Image (cartoon, rainbow, N blue to C red):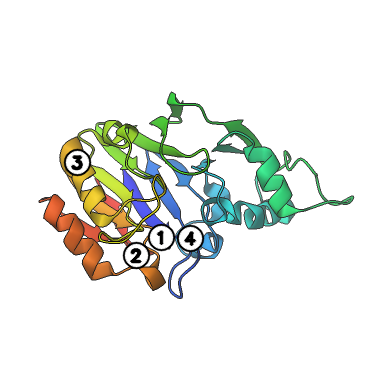
Amino acid sequence: MKLTVIGCAGSFPAPDTPCSAYLVEAGGYRLLIDFGTGSLGELQKHLDPHLIDAVIVTHLHADHFFDACAYAVMRRYASDAPKHPLPLYGPTGVADRIVAAYGGQGELCSPSMRDVYDFRELRSGTFDLGPLTVTVDRVAHPVETFGLRVEHAGSSLAYTSDSGPCQALEALATHCDVLLAEASYLEGRENPKDVHLTGKEAGEYATKSGAARLLLTHLVEPWNSKDQTLAEARAAYTGPVEVVRPGQVYEF
């Protein structure tokens, strides 16, 4: 499996990174996990966006789905774009939410956007996407949000999406090769419950689940400290850990 970090900023784009978007490739299949604000531009540095086979939107906050609207324009009006709708998986109401955000009406637009996307709502469980096996489960966040695990040929990636501490995270990450975990908060502050993880909590989940590697993402740079987040994670997890950046590629 190959993981390319497209965007990793938390909550809003940073000067040097768009919001959450991660490209997973295996067996000739290309899955985009989240499609956050600004990520379409960065994606084009790595792949023709028309080659994506499916998209999973883990939840319906703008920093995880908003460029699905921009891509709708690209795919609808490009002369060389695929003619079939792109499978897009997301939480309950994903179609209505993306259509509302796009705001397209009139004779040149399909109000349902089903000419561009084949919308499919997620439910906790396991399903196949091409050669990939995907497991999703609800995690702790103010809106319906899914963490996920992607497996192929004995390799595995777990992704927390945005989540406070919950049992589902440990289960999804069990003995994974890579745990891609958000770490938006710092210890020692009055952090809201059931919203985000700290670096320490991400490290604890990596340890409890037996993850082989921990990648930290979704840092909100104006409110966070990369060095402190790393120190928190390393105090709780003895394996390899780093904070991801756009354009980084991991193969496992």
Residue identifier under label 4: 11
Whether 47 is drawn above or below 172: the answer is below
**Distance from the alpha carbon under mark 4 to that under mark 2:** 15 Å
Residue 79: x percent and y percent? 72, 54
Residue identifier under label 2: 245
For the residues labelled 4 and 3, say whether their Cβ atoms are less than 8 Å apart: no
Residue identifier under label 1: 8
**Upstream in the sequence, badge 4 or badge 3?**
4
**Distance from the alpha carbon under mark 1 to that under mark 4:** 10 Å
Residue drawn where x is 64% and y is 36% of the image? 93
Residue identifier under label 3: 211
* Residue sitting at the far front: 190
Task: Tell me the kind of residue under disc 1.
Answer: Cys
Whether 20 is drawn above or below 125: the answer is below
Residue 242: x percent and y percent? 23, 60
For the residues labelled 1 and 3, say whether their Cβ atoms are less than 8 Å apart: no
Residue mark closest to the camera, 4 vs 3: 4
Task: Tell me the kind of residue under disc 4.
Answer: Ser
**Upstream in the sequence, badge 2 or badge 1?**
1
**Upstream in the sequence, badge 2 or badge 3?**
3
Residue drawn where x is 89% and y is 50% of the image? 107
Q: Is residue 32 visible?
A: yes
Residue 28 location, quadrant: top left
Task: Tell me the kind of residue under disc 3.
Answer: Ala
Tell me the SS state at disc 4.
loop
**Upstream in the sequence, badge 4 or badge 2?**
4
Tell me the SS state at disc 3.
loop
**Residue in the foreground of this view, choosing between 109 and 123:** 123
**Distance from the alpha carbon under mark 4 to that under mark 3:** 26 Å
**Distance from the alpha carbon under mark 2 to that under mark 3:** 20 Å
Q: Is residue 84 visible?
A: no
Is 107 left or right of 167, judged from the image as shown? Answer: right
